[in-house]
Image: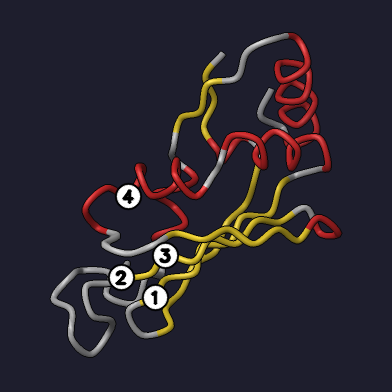
């Protein structure tokens, strides 16, 4: 089963110089558990490819079902130096939400179907 991260979470992002913060808030605790398992710093760095030149770190906020990814070297120098269209990283979250993830087994399928039914997507 392949789903997009947006089926399981909301997101927001922004800049701190050449560092971009990408936050995801899962739609519920079960979706958080799935995202926590699948979205590692390595998979997120791979998603952004050469756009992120430094380390990617992940911070978990289990009490609000959120993950925050810190993308060092993610903004080509930052807002005052970069010629990128999104030099402030305001849409970096959307790139992550559009990421397809592979989930196998009946448990993930049930979580996705439950989230979809409550969000009007199913």
**Residue where numbered disc 1 is placed:** 19
Q: How far apart are labels 1 and 2 at the CA level?
A: 6 Å
Placement of the N terminus among the 4 image quadrants: top right
**Residue where numbered disc 4 is placed:** 48
**Residue where numbered disc 3 is placed:** 71
**Residue where numbered disc 2 is placed:** 73
Disc 2 + disc 3, Cβ < 8 Å: yes
Disc 1 + disc 2, Cβ < 8 Å: yes
Q: How far apart are labels 4 and 2 at the CA level?
A: 11 Å
Look at 43% across and 83% down and name the residue there. Answer: 16
Answer left or right for 15 relative to 116. Answer: left
Look at 51% across and 32% down and name the residue there. Answer: 4
Placement of the C terminus among the 4 image quadrants: top right
Look at 65% across and 39% down and name the residue there. Answer: 35
Q: How far apart are labels 4 and 3 at the CA level?
A: 9 Å
Q: Position of residue 3 (x, y in %)?
A: 54, 25
SS state under label 3: strand
Lower sequence index among marks 4 and 1:
1
Disc 4 + disc 3, Cβ < 8 Å: yes
Q: How far apart are labels 2 and 3 at the CA level?
A: 6 Å
Q: Position of residue 47 (x, y in %)?
A: 36, 43
SS state under label 4: helix
Disc 4 + disc 1, Cβ < 8 Å: no
In this rendering, which labeled residue sits more in front, label 4 or label 2? Answer: 2
Q: Residue furthest bottom?
A: 80
Lower sequence index among marks 4 and 3:
4
């Amino acid at each position: 089963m392949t789903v997009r991260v947006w089926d399981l979470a909301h997101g927001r992002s922004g800049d701190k110089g050449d560092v971009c913060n990408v936050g995801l808030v899962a739609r519920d605790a079960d979706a958080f558990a799935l995202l926590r398992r699948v979205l590692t710093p390595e998979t997120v760095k791979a998603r952004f490819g050469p756009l992120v030149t430094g380390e990617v770190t992940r911070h978990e906020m289990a009490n609000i079902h959120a993950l925050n990814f810190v993308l060092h070297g993610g903004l080509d120098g930052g807002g005052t130096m970069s010629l990128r269209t999104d030099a402030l990283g305001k849409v970096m979250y959307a790139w992550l939400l559009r990421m397809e993830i592979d989930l196998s087994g009946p448990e993930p399928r049930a979580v996705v179907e439950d989230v979809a039914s409550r969000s009007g997507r199913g």
